[in-house]
Amino acid sequence: MIIRPRYFPVLLAMTLLAIGAVARADDATTQPQPAVSPDAKALLSQVRLAYYKARPLQITGTINGDFDIDGQAHKEKGEFAGAIAPDGKFRDDMKDDTLLGYTGKSVYLFLSDQNKYAVTDAPSGAVNLDTIDSDVADALRQQDYSLALAFSPDAANEIVSTAVSIQKSPDTVIDSVSYPTLQVAQKDSDVTLVFDPKTYLLDRQIVDVTRRAKAAGSKEIKVATYTIDFTSTVPASLDDAQFAWAPPAGSQELQEDQSMVGKTVPAFELSDLNGKKVTSASLKGTVYVLDFWATSCAPCVASLPSMDDLNQEMHSKGVTIFAVNEQEDADTVKKFIDDKKLTLPVLLDSDGKVFDSFNGEAIPLTVIVGKDGKVRKGYLGMGYEKEIRQELEAALQEK
């Protein structure tokens, strides 16, 4: 199916989608146990106990992203506030962005910029980070990792589950105070976790995704990090009313199934950078890819070189990968393509209608179309080159 968005905060999605900022490790049954140094284990034990006792808990924080990838530099900022009750009810709100929580009866996620929501009944039995809806759990991990640790049945295991190795780093000094620090090496990113020396709750999280961006094809990475600072308070009690939630008037439910697999591609006519028209009708009988992107989208920028390489590899087999730009002017797009020395053909979706026709909600979105003119597969985010190549090879075998 066309993979629906993993509803991470939009702030992070636009800069880190599929980069895996706090990505979960693959199934533990197929992965070796991470290497954890003895001093790191000792600190993790203190963190486990701290979060086990940390209810009720209120957390506020700021997110600051700093990215300079292949000549595209930008910064991101955000603020969030969360709380968790002794019985596990929680609420976390990214300002002007994503609200998610557990009311005691249901688990929900609300995207304020889209005025859309998803809500599911709470699971039977224990309700925690490992048992709630995976979209909400992953969003919480991305948006407020400290609250995710408080909602986890075991904060130390939650940290270890993402890791390839964990080392105790030299303490981080903040305002002349030493803060115990862990360095967590994940499969494709490096995370620094800084803990309050009095409470052993998370004080700062620094995520460096340079390795992931390189693996996705980026050539020049000056900086690719975001920093989250947390402020934790332990109130005497929390008002149950703050955990209640209902869909706002006029909001719409996010649809689980927006798949277009097996459906005929919506008819389109797009111009390339030279003004030549390309239509869905003219492409029928061939295997092709529509890779929706924009110069302002960091994951798109990071993934385009690898898509360009894949186009060169597959072109001799009759496959064309079109980079379909979203709502930017031709001069801006042409300059970008020339500066990057990319060779794949570019189409201009100037009004965004073609993207909308694929039920698009975020970019990069990559759609594979078979010889019959029907959608075979879709991928949201970056880093799917291997899967895309395999799907293209399979499509070429069909008559």
Image: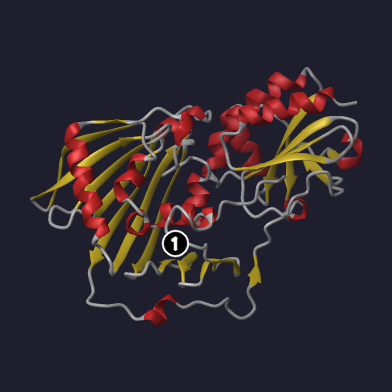
Q: Kindly tell me whether residue 44 is visible in this rendering.
A: yes
Which is more toward the observer, 99 or 78?
Answer: 99
Residue on which disc 1 sits: 127
Horizontally, is 365 left or right of 134 in the view? right
Q: Which secondary structure lies at badge 1? A: loop
- Residue count near mark 1 (Cα–Cα under 10 Å), binned few <14, some 14–19, many ≥20: many
Give x and y (percent) for residue 125: 47, 62
Horizontally, is 161 left or right of 175 in the view? right
User: How many dots with numbers?
Assistant: 1
| Quadrant placement of the C terminus | top right
Residue at left 31%, top 77%? 238
Which is more toward the observer, 55 or 352?
Answer: 55
Residue at left 32%, top 61%? 61
Q: Amino acid at mark 1?
A: Val
Residue at left 86%, top 30%? 286
Give x and y (percent) for residue 212: 46, 33
Q: Dividing the picture into quarters, in which one does residue 83 lie? A: bottom left
Which is more toward the observer, 105 or 269?
Answer: 105
Q: Is residue 375 above or below residue 230?
A: above
Give x and y (percent) for residue 49: 22, 53
